[in-house]
């Protein structure tokens, strides 16, 4: 590991695996998911998808012979093709993830990477300028 240069794919892979074993990605995912359903971008996307699906279903008459799986797959494809998910998800990321990157995620990732690269030499105090 010491002989690998910064940015080496093998070193990057080892660091990512270490971050995963530390549970950092799971923690980030939980933190983001805990916030997502309160953000305007999520609520807006949910409303848009609900309206889209309701409008589509209003054009179909229910019958016992209706192939629900085919209808569900058709709606899924229409929603994906509409582009509303891509735009909505981008807005959700901007409202949920972006504010956490510099103040929450980066310091934790940097701490774990320092511990990985220099085991035993890490202290909780930041380096002096």
Image (cartoon, helix red, strand yellow):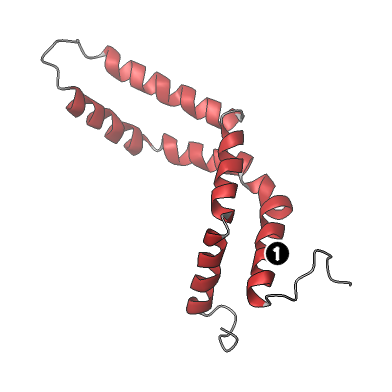
**In the image, residue 49 lies at what x, y percent?**
41, 26
85 is higher (above) or lower (below) than 43: below
**Residue 105: x percent and y percent?**
66, 54
In the rendered image, residue 32, in percent from the top left (x then y), is placed at 59, 41
Residue at position x 34%, y 32% in the image: 79
Q: Is mark 1 on a helix, strand or loop?
A: helix
From the top left corner, tell me how far across and down residue 58 is, in percent: 29, 12
Which quadrant of the figure has residue 92?
top right
- Rendered view: 87 above or below 64: below
Residue located 68% across and 58% down the image: 108
The picture quadrant where one finds residue 1 is bottom right
Left or right of 129? Residue 96 is: left
Mark 1 burial class by Cα count in 10 Å: few <14, some 14-19, many 20+: some
From the image, which quarter does the C terminus lie in? bottom right
Q: Which residue lies furthest to the bottom in this view?
A: 3
Nearest the viewer among 105 and 80 is: 105
Picture quadrant of residue 111: bottom right
Residue in the image at 68% along x and 70% along y = 115
Q: Residue at the location (63% across, 72% down)?
A: 116
Q: Viewed as shown, does residue 88 lie left or right of 50?
A: right
Residue for badge 1: 111
Residue lying furthest left: 65
Quick one: 101 or 10, which is closer to the camera? 10
Q: Is residue 121 left or right of 62 when viewed as pictured?
A: right
Say if 52 sits above or below 97 in the image. above
Question: Which of the pair 129/40 is nearer the observer?
Answer: 129
């Amino acid at each position: 590991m010491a002989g690998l240069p910064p940015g080496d794919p093998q070193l990057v892979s080892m660091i990512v695996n270490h971050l995963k074993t530390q549970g950092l990605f799971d923690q980030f995912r939980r933190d983001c998911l805990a916030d997502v359903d309160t953000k305007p971008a999520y609520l807006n996307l949910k409303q848009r998808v609900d309206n889209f699906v309701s409008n589509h279903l209003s054009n179909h008459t229910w019958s016992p012979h209706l192939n629900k799986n085919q209808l569900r797959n058709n709606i899924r494809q229409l929603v994906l093709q509409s582009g509303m998910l891509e735009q909505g998800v981008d807005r959700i990321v901007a409202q949920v993830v972006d504010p956490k990157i510099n103040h929450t995620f980066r310091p934790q990732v940097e701490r774990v990477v320092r511990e990985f690269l220099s085991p035993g030499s890490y202290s909780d105090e930041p380096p002096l300028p």
